Image: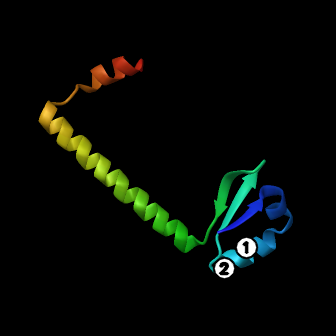
């Protein structure tokens, strides 16, 4: 992964895009701290698939917990959240 300041990336955006097209990944930083990444669409699809899988696992765990411990009425949830 290539580390680059956000201001340098802004100046050389076309080079960054060309690099991403060649499979390079860029970590953009501001004041030395990583703030963003520039990756290919393929890499983004992989990240989204991982996130979707994690969300599905969490949903299954929540359903299993609800089945084991009973459910909470929607009105009670709204009241607890102040909605």
Is the residue 66 above or below the residue 40 in the image? above
Left/right placement of residue 43 relative to residue 6 reads left
**Which quadrant would the N terminus be assigned to in this image?**
bottom right
- Residue drawn at point x = 82 percent, y = 61 percent: 10
Picture quadrant of residue 65: top left
> Which residue lies under the disc numbered 1?
17
Q: Is residue 60 above or below residue 24?
A: above
Classify residue 11 as left or right of residue 30: right
- Quadrant of the snapshot with the C terminus: top left
Establish if 30 lies above or below 47: above
From the image, tell me which residue sits under label 2.
Answer: 21
Side of 61 relative to 10 (left or right):
left
Q: Dot 1 surroundings within 10 Å: few (below 14), some, or many (20 or more)?
A: some
* SS category of the residue bearing label 1: helix
Give the image quarter of residue 7.
bottom right
Hey, which residue is sitting farthest front in the picture?
Answer: 32
Question: Could you say where residue 69 lies in the image, as x and y percent from the top left?
Answer: 15, 31
Image position, residue 77 (x, y; %): 31, 24
Could you tell me residue 31's position as x and y percent?
78, 47
Disc assigned to residue 76: none
Q: Residue furthest bottom?
A: 22
Q: Are marks 1 and 2 in contact (CB under 8 Å)?
A: yes
- The residues bearing labels 1 and 2 have C-alpha atoms spaced at a distance of 6 Å
Question: Label 2 crowding class (10 Å Cα cut-off): few <14, some 14-19, many 20+?
Answer: few
Residue 16 location (% of width, % of height)? 75, 71
């Amino acid at each position: 992964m290539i580390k680059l300041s956000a201001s340098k990336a802004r100046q050389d955006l076309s080079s960054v895009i060309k690099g991403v097209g060649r499979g390079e990944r860029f970590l953009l930083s501001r004041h030395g701290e990583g703030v963003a990444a520039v990756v290919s669409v393929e890499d983004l699809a992989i990240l989204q698939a991982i996130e979707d899988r994690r969300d599905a696992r969490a949903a299954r765990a929540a359903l299993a917990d609800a089945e084991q411990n009973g459910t909470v009425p929607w009105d009670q949830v709204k009241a607890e959240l102040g909605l």
